[in-house]
Amino acid sequence: MRLSVIGCGYLGAVHAAAMASIGHEVVGIDVDAEKVGALSRGEAPFFEPGLQDILTEGVASGRLSFTTDMSEAAGAAVHFIGVGTPQQADGYAADLTYVRAAVAALVPHLRPGDVVAGKSTVPVGTAAELSEQITPTGAVLVWNPEFLREGWAVKDTVDPDRLVVGVPAGGAGEAAAQTLREVFHPAVAKGTPFIVTDYATAELVKVSANAFLATKISFINAMAEIAEATGADVTQLADAIGHDERIGRKFLGAGIGFGGGCLPKDIRAFSARAEELGRRESVNFLREVDAINLRRRDRAAQLVVDALDDRPHGRRVAVLGAAFKPHSDDVRDSPALDVAVRLHGLGADVVVTDPQAIGNARKVHPHLTYSADLDDALRDAEAVLIVTEWDEYRRHLTPEHAASLARGRTVIDARNCLDPARWRAAGWSYRGMGRP
Ligand code: UDX
C-alpha cells in the first residue's frame, strides 16, 4: 500500500521505516529540512535500537522516501499523522498547533476514500474537531493511538500488543478500519487484538494507559518514601506485591521516577482536559502522581548532598546517566539530567556521562560538564550517582573498578539497579531509593 507519514520525530520516523519494512511504499513528510535530509540519506536522526537497519534497508529498496513537500502525500491510501503534541509553554494543556497545521496542510491533497490516521496523543475531543475539516474532502479520519516505548519502538510498531482504531459511525468508518487491518497485516495475521472504537474511546485509551503507568510508578515511589521513614526495603516490597498477578511486578521500579516525552506531559494534558470537561476531581490524583514523581528528584539530590556532608560546593560528583531511561538518547523531561542540574545549581562540580545522550543533553544544558568516557567521569569523584540504569553501569561497572578511579566511596543508586551487598563488600557506602 502507499502510505504517507506526517511528522518524522521519534514516532513518525520509526513508523515510516517500520511500515516500509513490512512491505509498504512510504513517504515521510516533515517541515524540518535538516531532519528530512538525514533520513533521506538513510541516517537515523536519533538513537533507537533497530531503526538504523530498517531505515537503510527501506531507503535502499526505494520503498521509503522523505520530503518536506506535502503534495507528495497525494496518492497515498493512508496518511498517518505523527507530529508532536508538547505541553503548552504557559500551562498543562497539550499544544495542538502542530496537529492542526499538519491537517490543514494535508487537506488540499486528500482524495475521496483516503484514510487519515491520527497517531499523535491528543486531548479527547480532538478527532471529532479535526474530522470537520477532513470529512468534506471525502476522506475518513480514524484515530489510531501509538503505544510504542522508546528503546523498543521498532518492535512495538511492527508487533504491538494491541491495535486500537477509533472510527466514525457507519460504513465509511468500518471500511477505514478494514484498511488499517490491511496496513498492519503481519500483526493482524498473528492474532494481535484489533479493537475498533469511537473517537473518544480511542483517544482516552492512550491517555488512560499512560496515566495508569505513571500512577503505578508513583505508587511505588510513594511506598519508597514510607520505606525511608520506617527502614523497610521498597525493592523487596515490590517483589513481594508483584507476585500477585493482579498487581504484577512491571513498572514497580522505585527510583527517580518517570520522565521522557510522553508520561509527564500526557498526565498534565489529561488533567487540563478533565478540568475543561468539568471532571477535574476524577483525575485529581494525577496531580499527586506528578508531585510524588518530582519529589524523588529532590530526594536523589539530597542523598548526594548528605554524602558530601552538606557541603556540595566545588565537590566533584560523577553523574552516570542523562537519558530519561536506558536504550534511548532522549533527554526530554529527563529525571537524570534534572538531578544533575540541581546538583550543579548547588555548586557541585558535576561531570555527566551517558552512552548515548550527551549530544542532546549538551543542547539543553550547555553549562554542565560532560564526558563520554565513564572512567573520566569517575576519576576523582567524591560521590558517584547513578541516575539512568544503563547496562554499562548496572552490569559492567564493578565496585573495584569504580574505587580505582573515584576519590570518595559513596555510591547513590537512584535507580535501585546495583547490588548493595556487592558494593558494600567492596568498601562503598551504598544509598538506594527507599532502601535501608
Ligand atoms: C511510555 C509508554 O510506556 C508508552 O506505552 C507510550 O507510548 C509512551 O510513553 P516511554 O516514554 O518510551 O513510553 O517510556 P517508559 O518505558 O514507559 O518509561 C517512562 C519513564 O518511567 C522512564 O523515565 C522510566 O525510567 C520510568 N520508569 C519506568 C520508572 O521509574 N520505574 C519503572 O518501573 C518503569
Image (spheres, rainbow, N blue to C red):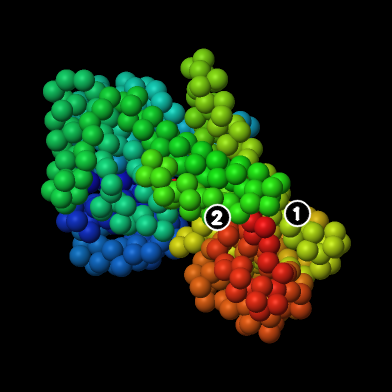
Q: Nearer the viewer, residue 157 or 64?
A: 157
Q: Residue at x 71, y 46 (%)?
A: 229
Which quadrant, please, contains the C terminus?
A: bottom right
> Taking 363 as reference, is 99 left or right?
left
Is the CB atom of the residue marked by disc 1 within 8 angstroms of ligand 1's nearest atom? no
- Using the image, determine if residue 128 lies above or below residue 249: above
Locate residue 241, reporting x and y percent. 47, 46
Dot 2 falls on a residue whose secondary structure is helix
Amino acid bearing label 1:
Gln
Q: Residue at x 51, y 38 (%)?
A: 215
Where residue 235 is drawn, which disc sits there?
2
Q: Quadrant of residue 222?
A: top right
Q: Position of residue 397 (x, y in %)?
A: 57, 76
Q: Crowding near pointer 1: few (<14 within 10 Å), some, many (20+)?
A: some
Determine crowd level at label 2: few under 14, some 14-19, many 20+ residues with C-alpha closer than 10 A: many
For residue 286, above or below residue 218: above
Q: Earlier in the sequence, mark 2 or mark 1?
A: 2
Secondary structure at numbered mark 1? helix
Can you tell which mark lies on residue 302? Answer: 1
Using residue 97 as the reference point, say whether residue 380 is left or right of it: right
